[in-house]
Image (tube, coloured by chain):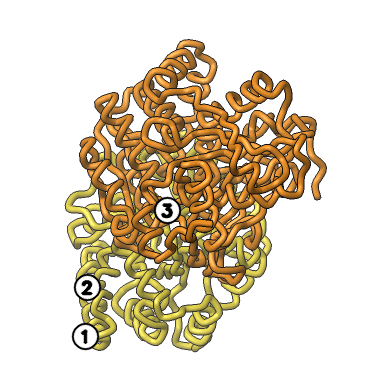
Amino acid sequence: MLFSRLRMSRRAAFIPFLTAGDPDLQFTAAALPILGQAGADLIEVGFPFSDPIADGPVIQASYTRALQGQLRLNHIWEMLRSLTTTPQWQTPLVGMVSYSLIYRKGLQRFVVAARQAGIHGLIVPDLPVEEAEELAQVCRDYECKMILLVTPTTPLQRAERIVRICSGFVYVVSVVGITGSRDHLPPTLRPLLHRLRSLTDLPLCVGFGVSKPEHVEELAEVADGIIVGSALVQLLENARQDPAGTLAALGTFVRRLCQPLHQQSKPAP
Amino acid sequence: MLTAPSSLRHYPDQRGRFGPYGGRYVPETLMYALEQLETAYKEARQDPQFHQEFNRWLQEYVGRPSRLYFAERLTREAGGARIYLKREDLNHTGAHKINNALGQALLTRRMGKQRVIAETGAGMHGVATATVAALFGLRCRVYMGQEDIRRQELNVFRMRAMGAEVFPVGSGSQTLKDATNEALRDWMSSVETTHYIIGSVVGPHPFPMIVRDFQSVIGQETRQQCLEQLGRLPDAIVACVGGGSNAAGMFYPFLDDQQVELIGVEAGGRGPVLGHHAATLNYGSPGVLHGTFSYVLQDEDGQTAPVHSVSAGLDYPGVGPEHSWWHDTGRVRYCSVTDQDALAAFHLCARLEGILPALETAHAVAEALRLAARMSSQQVVVICFSGRGDKDCAEVARLGQNPPSSS
């Protein structure tokens, strides 16, 4: 729905990432609407995990800060539910969750809780396609999207298998490595997107290393969505000391990153 | 209990599974590297020249075969079965870790990579990796938690002296599990040029299989030495289990010898409350950690629980997936030994045999003494004597555990 609307207006989606509970859930509850108002089309909510192997130092530090506050999964669900059930709420949410957390709760229990909290899809960065079928089935049963990742090291045949099981959108990792901000987008990205385009009609959203309006501008022409994580999470480092200032900074940063997209937007022919 | 298949030696299967355990729970970026490693290892495994070279280095550099030694005074102390020590502590660098590090360094060379990384807790695997990196002229970085760097000063010095870079890890609990996270992250950005020499039978497939295979030299030698020296197989074999590499290497060649009882000893720490021990198979449940499905110690949300053991090498909230399978099939019995009993065994072994065991090894000694006492003098217990205790002397002294006064 979201992506077809955006495609009509020939505009890429802007997808910021925010850790639930960093520094606390009250802050997250205030920050999510601000991201929406500042131009987020979809928000990726990170579920803190003690041992996140796919994430870089910025997001891991954020997870650690969140877990230091005795954060429980139930409290995340409650916060999201009270937010997404208000009539003003419009921005769809997807969860970024380690399989360790999903497995412990039970696949079905986790997906049901996520759907009840207003989450539309799950990104599970440590669940490769070989192990994904069981969760994919549960997601289908509860109309939850399951978003898998494709990287520059993924061979074409494998990518084909991945996009087949994928729903919602494909998360295209722009670089080899972990999440984190980078100066330049890699030259291999454009050919990777072209290859994927030949395999699937699903929207292709690019993440890992997007941190500047110039990145967004460059990507807007080739990708259906742009995911910004570490650059945003970095702003949370002082959130405990200065929550109001941090919320304002988040809004400003997202507006600045979104700007190239709104210039890009044109009426459908 | 599940039904054991015809032979437990046939695992893992094509998907890297030991029964339900194992597999690969890693970011997509690592899948390519793991497949490349699996292919390289399968080729090496079938290449007689690779085995020849591995065996030659084991003999000439590590000093294998290690001795199977009759511990007469420990035997008398226990008052039951005869106790033998498989002396992995006599290997170059003082522990079994060198067997695996050497094998993986040869694999690194074969894959044409110039750099190795490793994680380390107590520092023994870090030292073993630094050693083989020096030997083969590979660049080497070892990830080590800041807390462990503080506890294991001597090993940090040894690694640096051999040219390795010791990279302090300040995230999370600043111990082995965080060093493992950091090494996996490094590998995700460096797979083209770097091999990750994982230190135990943990992590995503094919690591648990590779490490077990390289460590199996322990069990193969023990089996042969028992037949030569005793004319028969032992009645029981005891080994400590953190991630479980020395135990996996010792047990694997004996899996089909049903008359040999196999016992894995986990770190019981201060007691059975979550957070006070590292006895994953005794108190944990199946879950996902560090890229594999195995028993883990987690809270009800799936967050990794804090663990404790007096021994840094057993201080790990997971366990190798093959051990989980052996546990469920009942082929291996897993028990635990407390900090206090391990420390007592450390002193006893030192005073009676003139051998200082690593604190990890002391857990196995403690259980073996209990076990031997219940057996007859006709029977034989072998302890996998995984490492020497020099590295632990400062910690034992700090704990104020003075040797018991002379009797």
Task: Tell me the CA gap for discs 1 and 3.
Answer: 31 Å
Earlier sequence position, callout 2 versus callout 3: 3
Side of B279 where A23 appears, left or right: left
Give me the residue at 53% from left, 84% from top. A78
Q: Quadrant of residue A10?
A: bottom left
Amino acid carrying mark 3 in the image: Tyr
**Which residue is situated farthest in the front direction here?**
B407
Q: Is residue A171 above or below residue A94?
A: above
Q: Colour of chain A?
A: yellow
Badge nearest the viewer, 1 or 3: 1
Q: Colour of chain B?
A: orange
Per the image, the residue denoted by label 3 is: A171
Per the image, the residue denoted by label 1 is: A245
Give me the residue at 41% from left, 67% from top. A44
Badge nearest the viewer, 2 or 1: 1
Front one among A221 and A10: A221
Which SS class for mark 3?
Answer: strand
Give me the residue at 32% from left, 53% from top. B152
Per the image, the residue denoted by label 2 is: A253
Front one among A208 and B165: B165
